[in-house]
Image: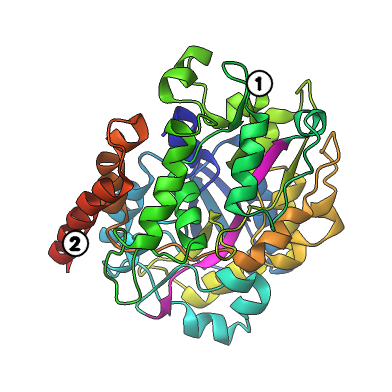
Amino acid sequence: MSLDRAQVSRRSFLGLGVAAGVITLTACGSSSGSSDEPLVMTVWGGETDRTTYQKRIDLLVKKYPDLKVKLQLIPSDSYPQKVQTMIAGGKGPDIMQVAENVNVYSSKNQLQPLDDLAKSAGLDLSKRFGSIGSLYSYQDKVYAIPDRSGAMIVYYNKTLFESKGIKAPTADWTWDDTLDAFKELTSKGKTWGYGGAGWWPQWWSFAYQNGGTIIDANGKPAVDSDEVVEALQWAGDLLFKHGVVPTKAQYADMGTDVGGDQAFAAGKVAVNTTGFWAIAGLTDTKFEWDIAPMWRGKKQAVSSFGSGLAISRTAKNPKNAMKAIDFLTSPTAQQQIIATGEDVPANLEVQQSEAFLKPAWMKTPVNMGVFGESSSFLFKAPFIPEWNEMQAAFDTGLADFWLGKEKSAKNALSAVQKNLESIIKSAG
């Protein structure tokens, strides 16, 4: 895992923890005589996140003057502990941002199931969010409403592609097409075809494209299946067999903290797969670039980044909290997410709107329609309660594989499989 992948939590699932402490902002309703306590909404993030959430809350209060909302920003590294302590003390947030660790909370009865509340509010999750409507679910109950969600996308160096006579990547590219392009785009010691797939959203996408799954329908680990093994082996061979991805040592030679995102911006890799946030680092590149949907394997599949809004079990007024979430995920409020350049809105209507396809702040033409196109083949990652332990098992078990010390994906994943079986069995 390259360093920028480890730090990518800023915009994807884990959030950007740059706040020095809890920052509280309040948007109060204008109705007089209301003695109701304000809804407390906790999120993680930086200045752009603070501004964007507050703008959305202000719109909420403008529409519903009877509601009061207090926004709290908590650093991402202390966020889980902070909100769980609040809930344990009976003073949990009414609305809280969650991500891939949502079921760490729900499995401990720290969140309220939202199915009935959403139904009462007339919120159709499938219509509003498509395939990710029930993404944040556990034991057939929904525990969070999608709020921010964008597919992993393909960034490609148009200048380099055109110089090699290679057509722009599309969702119809196969693994063979992709490898052929990576080979053509690689110039030993100068440029590499691809930034690498050592980060779980990348190689998991290949696993699901190949018909595999990380956790099967019965809740059992399935990472030693032929489909997953073949996918990981393909990803590893890009480094050590074909030489179209920089090794860890080669990344280190490029400079401190350089990984796929930075290497692409520097023109060192021709293709990078990552999220929306990388756009911000490409405003001053010396080459033309664009984005495309993820290529396919036996089928189309790609990971998604984002977060949802949940209601804690200690919420003072769950009905009002859902009323707020319903509005915050509506087109009116979600447009603010792209207007500030914060992220990709989960609302499909907004993803397909002119405001998203041609953001006012975008300096160069970018095919933003890729996000909407990709929404039809997002796979549902297994957000199991043991998510953190599972990720630690992958990090440890695949460390030698990504260094080239362990050549066999089968051997590496067989060891990970045993570890995961132990983790999930002990948790059960």
What secondary structure is found at the residue carrying circle 2?
helix
Q: Is residue 198 visible?
A: no
What secondary structure is found at the residue carrying circle 1?
loop
Q: For this rendering, which residue is in front, 183 or 413?
A: 183
Q: Residue at x 36, y 70 (%)?
A: 313
Q: Amino acid at mark 2?
A: Glu
Report x, y in % for residue 365.
86, 40
Q: Residue at x 28, y 64 (%)?
A: 221
Tag 1 near tag 2, CB within 8 Å = no
CA distance for labels 1 and 2: 41 Å
188 vs 336, left or right, is left
Q: Residue at x 47, y 74 (%)?
A: 318
Residue identified by numbered label 1: 266
Report x, y in % for residue 355.
83, 53
Q: For this rendering, which residue is in front, 66 or 211?
A: 211
- 400 drawn magenta: no
Badge 2 crowding class, 10 Å Cα cut-off, few under 14, some 14 to 19, many 20 or more, is some
| Start-end of magenta stretch | 140-156
Residue identified by numbered label 2: 421
- 145 drawn magenta: yes
Q: Quadrant of residue 266?
A: top right
Report x, y in % for residue 316.
42, 70
